[in-house]
Image (tube, grey):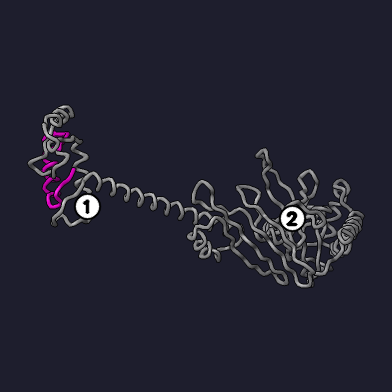
Amino acid sequence: MTINIADTEMLLGFAKEMASLGYRYAAHPLNLVTDSDSIAFFRTAMGAEDHCLIGPNDTDYFKSMPIDSLIDGLKMVMQSGMDTCGNGTLDLASFVRSESEKRELTENNLNGNIMNQKNLEFLENQIKYTGFGESLQIELKKKMEKGEKEFTLSHDARFDTARLLSELSFKKSDQSDLYFFNSYKAILQKEGAPHALEQIFYIGSENNFTMKEAFNLLEGRSVNKDLVSRDGEIYNCWVKLDFTDGETNGNFKMHHYHQNYGYNLEAALEKHAIKELQTPEAKESLMNSLKKGNVQAVTFIVGGEEKRQFVEANPQFKTIRVYDSSMQRINGRESQNQKQQDPQQNAVSSSKSQKKGADGESKGEDVSEEQQEKKAKKKSQSI
């Protein structure tokens, strides 16, 4: 349908009026400009089709259309911002098709923008709760806006005399514009160390390690995690890197000490004169910190006096490691002797002396642990 642009408003009002009177179809000439004199309205589709067959000449051929489509098309012209007071003609069908494509493109872009914003917010939260904070958000948004297939973000964390560099890897889906946080490479640099240690930690819906847990693992400590098996079953275990054995992808192998391995962190702690074990809240806080792989400051009671020292979990040998205030290792027997020197702790330990035998925990095992660790070190050095 070709119309005079200046007739748009008039034709729209005419079509609305006829629709209100019950007319449902309109017939317009194919090769002439449609105006109020040449357009005809009908109540039925058959009536409109019959009208289109009566023209004897090509210039009189008509075409029918639903009146609602005519009204929608004329409304689209009025709402487009076009100057409807000027001269000129307009192919209404072509205009409607073009405007519909523009609107669809705009709607798709809008939906895409909403989806991209949700994707950005999801990744921001994923990065934050993996321990990298919020400092990477601006760079993340810039990288996503570039639309590259893959990109990385760098993070730098300092821990006393150690530095942990992390390279976070992101990849766009092959099926959509969504990005995924797939993995991060943690690189530990320590003062005085001959070389850095590296480990790739993969990110998924389960079995993820935070940046601080990655640091603790690369420091040689153990981390307690609830993991999910391939069968979907949840199990708890301690995880430790084996720096003497590697995977094909360059990662260090992970040793898993499951519940049936028999490590009891609480029992290992209670062998020592630690003040924080005397209150439930402090005890729970201490154990939660050790399960994350942290070296935790505690208060040892020696001869009635308080002494600040440090401990870490050691599930491999079913003990804890103890360090003095200068982070120098204290052997297990010396640390337990500190407990025996304290009268109050002695009273508690004597009441539990029989339990020790049942648990298989004794000072002799501590000596065995130190011997085993020395052997492990020698083996690591020889490898």
Magenta segment boundaries in residue numbering: 1-28
Q: Which residue is at a point 17% across and 29% down the rendered structure image?
A: 49
Identify the element where label 2 is drawn: loop
Nearer-the-camera pick, 116 or 176: 176
Identify the element where label 1 is drawn: helix
In the image, residue 284 lies at what x, y percent? Answer: 69, 56
The residue that label 2 is drawn on is 250
Q: Which residue is at a point 17% across and 39% down the rendered structure image?
A: 30
The residue that label 1 is drawn on is 79
Q: Amino acid at mark 1?
A: Gln
Is 311 situated left or right of 38 in this image?
right
Task: State the image quarter where residue 218 is shown.
Answer: bottom right
Q: Which residue is the extreme one toward the left?
A: 37
Task: State the image quarter where residue 132 is shown.
Answer: bottom right
Q: Amino acid at mark 2?
A: Gly
Task: Please report contact status of discs 2 and 1: CB closer than 8 Å, yes or no.
Answer: no
